[in-house]
Image (cartoon, helix red, strand yellow):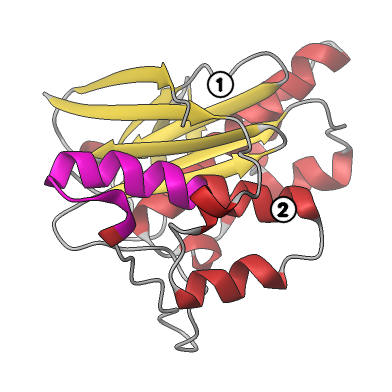
Amino acid sequence: MIVCEVWWAEPLPSEPRFLAFLDEPERGRYQAYRREIDRRRFLTGRVLAKTVLGEKLGRAPESVRFDATCVDCGKPHGKPRLPGTEFSISHSGERIGLAVAGASVGLDVETDTRNADDPLIEYALNETEREALAGLSPADKVGAFFRYWTQKEALMKATGLGLKIPLHSITLVDGQLAACSDAALDPATTRLADLSPGEGYRAAVAVLTSEELEVREERWSA
């Protein structure tokens, strides 16, 4: 069995004690956000990850340095990496999450208060999945759509390929990967779990493993 630990946090204030966690490239990214809430979400994700991973590695959080080099362009805005660890950060609204596992992991959280209109559904879901939504009430349809959406995002993040894997190539049935035309995802070595980020949110975690998956969630505060 493989264990995946998930921590949920709310946006931290932009105070010097938290800003001290950021290295120079991260400060550049922080400053590049125009909206204060986006800055705070980015800051919280880094503070949360460095605190949790630092504790696991026996290091001071401020000493943890991520490599966020984009594999496509070389700029420091890619998925953060730290040798010897497998983790994923996601944020939406007032939720910032961190997932840590012993295998490649992807986490996604979304607000589920938005409308799931037909163009969005057609963009994200393939024919098999759209048929599963047929006949649902509007409220149930929104909930079901965002379950699909977070699961697909989590899967793509776990591979490290993101949107390079077409959304329609992934087929989900009953909350698990049933098929994928991309070799990066194999149902035999993929595990999915829905999470509990709180009212108004949907979240899922994906771990690339053939073992059974146990998920442990907890709230985090600085």
Instruction: Please state which amino acid type lies under the numbered disc 1.
Output: Pro
66 lies above or below 134: below
Which comes sooner in the sequence, label 2 or label 1?
Answer: 2
Classed neighbour count for the residue bearing mark 2: other residues with Cα under 10 Å, few (<14), some (14–19), many (≥20): some
Can residue 136 be seen at all in this image of the molecule?
A: no
Q: Which mark is residue 197?
A: 1
Helix, strand or loop status at disc 2: helix
Residue extending farthest to the front is: 16
Q: Where residue 37 appears, x then y in whole percent?
A: 75, 47
The stretch drawn in magenta includes residue 58: yes
Q: Identify the residue shown where x is 55% and y is 29%.
A: 203
Range of magenta residues: 45-62
Front residue of 1/32: it is: 32
Q: Main secondary structure of the magenta part?
A: helix
Residue in the image at 33% along x and 56% along y: 62
Q: Residue at x 33, y 42 (%)?
A: 51
Is 25 or 138 nearer to us in this picture?
25
Along the horizontal axis of the image, is 32 left or right of 25? Answer: right
Image vertical order of residue 72 relative to residue 167, above or below: below
Amino acid of disc 2: Asp
Residue sitting nearer the eye, 194 or 122: 194
The residue indicated by pointer 2 is 38
When asked about the image quadrant of residue 74, the answer is bottom left
